[in-house]
Image (cartoon, grey):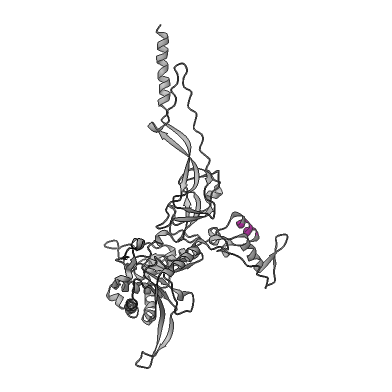
Amino acid sequence: MLTRPLRRLLGRPFVISHFHTSPSWSSKVLRQFKLADIGEGITECEVIKWSVKENSAIQSFDPMCEVQSDKASVEITSPFDGIVKELLVKEGEVAKVGQGLCTIEVEEDGEGEDSPQPIAPSSESPAPPAPPPPPPPSTEKPTEEQSTPRRLHPLDPNYKPDAVFTNAENVLATPSVRHFAKRMGVDLANLSPGSGRDGRVEKKDVENYLSGASGVDADGSLSVKAPGASMGADVVVELGRTRYGMWKAMVKSLEIPHFGYSTTLDITALNNMLPILNAHIPSHYAPPPSTPLPPLSISPSALFPAPSPPSVSPSGQYTKLTYLPILLKTLSKAMLEWPILRSSITPDSIADGRKPTLTIRPQADISIALSTPTGLYTPTIPCVDGHSIYALASRLKHLAHAGRQTPCALTPAEMPKRGGTITVSNVGAVGAGEFAAPVLVPGGGVAIVAVGRAKWVWDVERGEGKGERRLKVGVSWSADHRVLEGAELAAFVETWRGYVEAPERLIAEGV
């Protein structure tokens, strides 16, 4: 009589123990990866390249796609380990911030109360053992791929500023075009930027390169071709995203009533001071010497450690100063005396027909017009008045280096939405022009100045009527006439002239 109840009591702990000893479970779910806000003011991006395919395995931080905004291109990495099930946005299409880019199948683990409750087994038969979880998708890659260094975008968590890649792997091109160029012996770096979207190198670019200097026989060998070959028919090229952004900005610039003002600045004193400044460039701004320097006989850190200089990336090192960082420094000194040149139109104040207001900044923020292979950019150097001339030269060198990369390596931090209150365009660096007519766009501050090429001229007003040979540079201003009066701009330029033509004032004011 007691045997059967006893067996039932002995059997129950086994069933209950099996039910409660399953603390976790795993299942596969679909996660939609959405386009995040990659920078201030960016509302949409164009997908220019997918690095993965559907039904392919991917790991966290693996490159997934590359997107292009109006300001910079960004390589987006995967936040999940799993399998890419569907690409929601094709290459060349535009995605809004918050829109799904792809779906990834990931494996999730649950614990405790969140776990699904299994059906309680009956007393007549023990519960079947839980099926083992499916093995995770294989994410191993061949050893050759793991040993190949991957190009990292400045926004990637693994990016290091001193990592510089200048090989052909940076060129935008499809695998078929890369294979064709390799077979023909053509370096893609010589063809960048190409005729495709955002500088992508197409097969016709390789063929045009070959036809310009040589011909290809039927067996694939190269033969010299006579010069003067036909240039072919017209080619219709679609504007890249950066150039199209410039198109729209120039159209909006028609809303601004411009006021122009041009003059010349005497930079003879700057020219005389430049050799002294070049001879004393701090060591951390200069490239490392080919031979190590001998140790100091007397250490400045004998009593207490001397402060370490700031680290400077190789892209910011230089061997020679130019006039531009000195002009920026003197311009910032003049901006501190003129608050209206440190102002910008408050964006929310011009909506709904309300009375506009100006936002005056405590520091001098200056934007630099930068021509790059993919278009025109205006990176900003904040707080120019707080930087030394050597630091400004390093910053300009870095921005120029980042802009020359394909795709452009300027980061959203270097391209803030509100930008500077004055933009400087160094047109004299690319031509012999002395004056220009720069265009001010909405959001570009209250004024823009174009600096021409410096030239030696004979100034008859000097030397007590005998004249003197002086180095002068032309500057051309365009200002927002809704904010600045003509007399105010002219007086501000004269304040700037006082610093440029008498740079010794910087020493007395502590630079």
Q: Quadrant of residue 386?
A: bottom left
Residue 383 visible within the image = no
Task: Between residue 220 and residue 38, name the one nearer to us.
Answer: 38
Q: From the viewer's perspective, is residue 445 above or below residue 27? A: below
Q: Give percent across and percent down for residue 155.
A: 43, 55
**Quadrant of the frame with the C terminus:** bottom left
Q: Residue furthest top?
A: 1
**Residue 193 lies in what quarter of the image?**
bottom right
**Magenta-span inclusion, residue 178:** yes
The residue at the point 72 percent across, 59 percent down is 219
Pick the residue in front: 201 or 47: 47
Q: Residue at x 51, y 52 (%)?
A: 65
Horizontal and vertical percent position of residue 499: 32, 77
Question: Going by the image, does 510 lie left or right of 117?
Answer: left
Examine the structure image and report whether residue 420 is included in the region drawn in magenta: no
Residue nearer the viewer, 44 or 403: 44
Identify which residue is drawn at 41% across, 80% down.
473
Identify the residue at the far right of this view: 218
Q: In which quadrant is the N terminus drawn?
A: top left
Residue 455 seen anywhere in this rendered image of the structure: yes
| Horizontal and vertical percent position of residue 228 | 67, 73
The total number of labels drawn is: 0
- Look at the picture and state if 474 lies above or below 159: below
Residue stretch rendered in magenta on the structure: 177-183
In the shown orientation, is residue 51 left or right of residue 231? left
> Please, what is the dominant secondary structure of the magenta stretch?
helix
Q: Position of residue 491 (x, y in %)?
A: 32, 78
